[in-house]
Amino acid sequence: MRRFVAGRVPLEKHFRLRRRSFSQLAQNKASRQENDVVLPKMPYFDHSPPPYDGPSAADVLQKRKKYLSPSMFCFYNQPVNIVDGKMQYLFDENGRRYVDAFGGIATVNCGHCHPDVADAIVKQINRLQHSTVLYLNHAIADFAEALASKMPGDLKVVFFTNSGTEANELAMMMARQYTGCNDIVSLRNAYHGNAAGTMGATAQRIWKFNVIQTGVHHALNPDPYRGIFGSDGEKYAKDVQDLIDYGTSGHVAAFISEAIQGVGGIVELAPGYLPAVYSSIKKAGGLFIADEVQCGFARTGSHFWGFESQGVVPDIVTMAKGIGNGIPLGAVVTTPEIAEVLTRRNYFNTFGGNPVCTAAGHAVLKVIEKEKLQENAFVVGSYLKERLLSLKDKYEIIGDVRGKGLMLGVELVTDRKLKTPANVEVLHIMDQMKEMGVLVGKGGFYGNVFRITPPLCFTKEDADFFVDVMGYTMSKM
């Protein structure tokens, strides 16, 4: 396969954009043909968004450039202006429908504007939008009880925050207070947030500013695809013991990790890694913090929480994103004993546990159960992974297909033996897939991994369309 060179190879013109040409009616006509090739057909969906009469994409982009931080970037050569959403689909200003294979970065678990979640939000906001946790209100208590019921062991005490970064900051502080130690072990390639403490635990230079970051040691990443020990989790775990022996006093506060690295490129930890690491951390007096911000809330399909796949029980679990289906909400769940450390001083979060947010979170749990979204994530995710593996057999540019449930990654390389990152090709394919009606994320240290994290209501028909569009685009390179 030829390497795509930006600026030399023109974008394939397999379709013509016309306002409303991708309406519900047009999208469900018989598959069009061009050069005797049948184009992938988007699944039928019985919904049309109301007419949009707001600012155009160009107007919004101009305002962003003028009034918002220059650090905010957009996907695509021509950024898409999303104005409506319904379940696993998004709609732009022209009414064009897209399959959302990114889910707001693994956030919209139940589906966009799910009626049960939206109804819970509206009912609560019409009754009480905000007061303070200094007063009693049933919304926060009801959700905390429901959330605790989903946790193993003695993980029964909940602290609500507004984001995953906040949750991880709090978890790290609690571990340090509880153990009396400062040192924390994290993984290379990890992402845990962008505040002072979590930036220290994060281990990709693109996310780290030149500020003081102390007390965090980064162990070898147990990456089965690019790691030096392949899928041997116990060999990677030895590096954690070495860090404890040679980089600390012999005692640590905690070890923090995701079960599947999200921002890092959907990297599953090598089998057997976490049990071996836990043994070393416990001997050093430390706690285990499971970062479930992206892989929690049934996304992996086989389990409700990602850490469960390795048969371990953490001391502290952090979560956000899927917890609220897009509502700003995060949480830290721990044991009663560890939770006591916050009584040594005053700990308070103005918006953590807001009644509207916790009502939304409670509704999300109910929807996951009622609609069997964990089962769907497993069934559809397994089907999608098999189809992607078949695509890998066909196209040399696909170096690896990995992940669980509806948290999947496709890593592109220009040379399978050398594993040379195909980061330019990823951008080209993303743009072409967008033009054909598919939105997908990207990530990884080299920016060459497709991050596939759609809403958990994703169907096999959506999976077929996704793979067919990706395959069609690759066939034209």
Image (cartoon, helix red, strand yellow):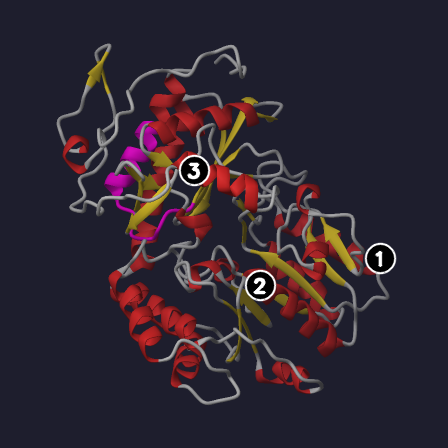
The residue that appears at 44% across and 26% down in the rendered structure is: 429
Tell me residue 121's x, y (percent).
33, 69
Whether residue 303 is visible here, answered yes or no, is: yes
The residue beneath circle 3 is 59
Amino acid type, residue under disc 1 in the picture = Gly
Tell me residue 215's x, y (percent).
79, 61
The residue beneath circle 1 is 247
Tell me residue 177's x, y (percent).
73, 77
Contact, CB < 8 Å: mark 1 with mark 3? no
User: Residues in magenta?
Assistant: 453-469
Res 179 → quadrant: bottom right
Q: Is residue 71 above or below residue 422?
A: below
Front: mark 1 or 3: 3
How many neighbours does mark 3 have within 10 angstroms: few (below 14), some (14-19), or many (20 or more)?
Answer: few
The residue that appears at 35% across and 46% down in the rendered structure is: 381
Comparing 80 with 107, the one in front is 80
Q: Is residue 161 above or below residue 188?
A: below
How many neighbours does mark 2 have within 10 angstroms: few (below 14), some (14-19), or many (20 or more)?
Answer: many
Res 258 → quadrant: bottom right
The residue beneath circle 2 is 290
How many neighbours does mark 1 have within 10 angstroms: few (below 14), some (14-19), or many (20 or more)?
Answer: some
Residue 268 is left or right of residue 391, and the answer is right
Helix, strand or loop at mark 3:
helix
